[in-house]
Amino acid sequence: MDMMDESFWTDVDFVTQKLNPKTHPYLISKTFTERAVLGFGTQHGLDVVTVNPGLVVGPFICPRFPDSVRSSLALVL
């Protein structure tokens, strides 16, 4: 695969059957939301732009420092 575009989607069945159940709600809701937004944009003649920030700064709502944040910060610190 050389390039990914809006024709590539998360396989909801794969997520449900094979991945950690703790990640299901996030991954599935993200996929459904992105599809709905793109459909809305098409229906109303709007261009849709997605911004994926490399780092979101703010207080954590989880009880410990997330491993993903630790890994990201290790690259720059």
Image (tube, grey):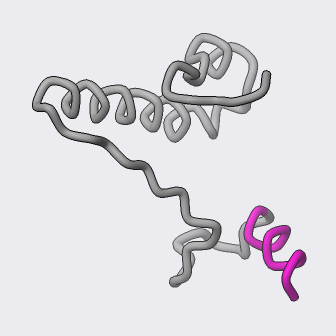
Query: Residue pushed farthest bottom?
Result: 77
When asked about the image quadrant of residue 30, the answer is top left
Which residue is located at x 80 percent, y 78 percent? 73
Residue 76 vertical position relative to residue 39 in the rendered view, above or below: below
Looking at the rendered structure, the number of numbered marks drawn on it comes to 0
Which residue is located at x 79 percent, y 70 percent? 72
Q: Main secondary structure of the magenta part?
A: helix
Residue 52 vertical position relative to residue 56 in the rendered view, above or below: above
Residue 71 vertical position relative to residue 37 in the rendered view, above or below: below
Residue 24, x across and y down, in percent: 57, 31
Residue 60 relative to residue 4: left or right: left
Residue 63 relative to residue 2: left or right: left
Which residue is located at x 37 percent, y 48 percent? 49
Residue 32, x across and y down, in percent: 39, 27
Which residue is located at x 10 percent, y 31 percent? 44
Range of magenta residues: 68-77
Residue 37 relative to residue 32: left or right: left
Observer-nearest residue: 75 or 2?
Answer: 2
Residue 33, x across and y down, in percent: 35, 34
Observer-nearest residue: 35 or 64?
Answer: 35
